[in-house]
Image (cartoon, rainbow, N blue to C red):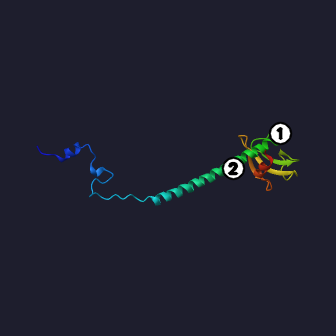
Amino acid sequence: MAHDPIETDLAQTAPRGNFLHYPTSRLGAKIIPQDLTNFKSRGVSRVERELQQELIELREKYLQVIDSFNWNKLIYEAHFGFEPVIGEQYHLYAVGGKHHLSMIEPESWHQKWIGTFRLNADGRWQLEKVADDFDLRGWITTNVE
């Protein structure tokens, strides 16, 4: 009977040397690990930049939500003797230490005008225009317990 090398190879249960991740003899090719320092530093700096930008965008969005909350709180706590109509503009004034929401234009009423707002369909007040001398964040810091 002739010896068949293919059947002998197929009958082996141990892995063949040419499929291993390391050399199986001293005559095998030298395995030199790749230097990944450059790849890692580029990846780290790119990911850090992207995450830093994401954090900046999140902070801006957070501040916008806080400002929107504070404006809505200020307006809903203001005095007004009418039911506002959705989509219409209204003006917030400081009169005698209290806040008043009015339909009167700032040019027609000589009170301290704070800002102009529009009532959205969801019940939120959207800032249209604010007085140059009114700082909401500063006002919140000094007037809210």
Q: Residue furthest front?
A: 26
The answer to whether 81 appears left or right of 47 in the picture is: right
Q: Residue at x 72, y 44 (%)?
A: 69
| Residue marked by disc 2 | 63
Please rate how many residues cluster around mark 1, counting C-alpha atoms within 10 Å: few if below 14, some from 14 to 19, many from 20: few
Q: Mark 1 = which residue?
A: 82
Measured from the top left, where is residue 74 in percent x and y? Answer: 78, 44
Q: Are marks 2 and 1 in contact (CB under 8 Å)?
A: no
Residue at the far left: name it: 1
Tag count: 2
Q: CA distance from mark 2 to mark 1?
A: 31 Å
In terms of depth relative to the viewer, which is nearer, 108 or 67? 67
Q: Position of residue 28 (x, y in %)?
A: 28, 57
**Mark 1 residue element:** loop
What mark, if any, has residue 141 been given in the picture?
A: none
> How would you rate the neighbour count of disc 2 (Cα within 10 Å): few for under 14, some for 14-19, many for 20 or more?
few
Quadrant the C terminus occupies: top right
In which quadrant will I find the N terminus?
top left
30 w.r.t. 71: above or below: below
Is 7 in front, or is 17?
Answer: 17
| Residue in view at x 46 percent, y 59 percent | 37
Q: Amino acid at mark 2?
A: Leu
Please name which of the two marks, 2 or 1, marks the residue nearer to the observer.
Answer: 2
Q: Position of residue 129 (x, y in %)?
A: 76, 52
Q: Disc 2 or 1, which lies upstream in sequence?
A: 2
Residue at disc 2, secondary structure: helix
Image coordinates of residue 116 in percent, x first then y, are: 78, 49
- Residue type of the residue flagged with mark 1: Phe
Q: Residue at x 69, y 50 (%)?
A: 63
Q: Is residue 9 left or right of residue 64?
A: left
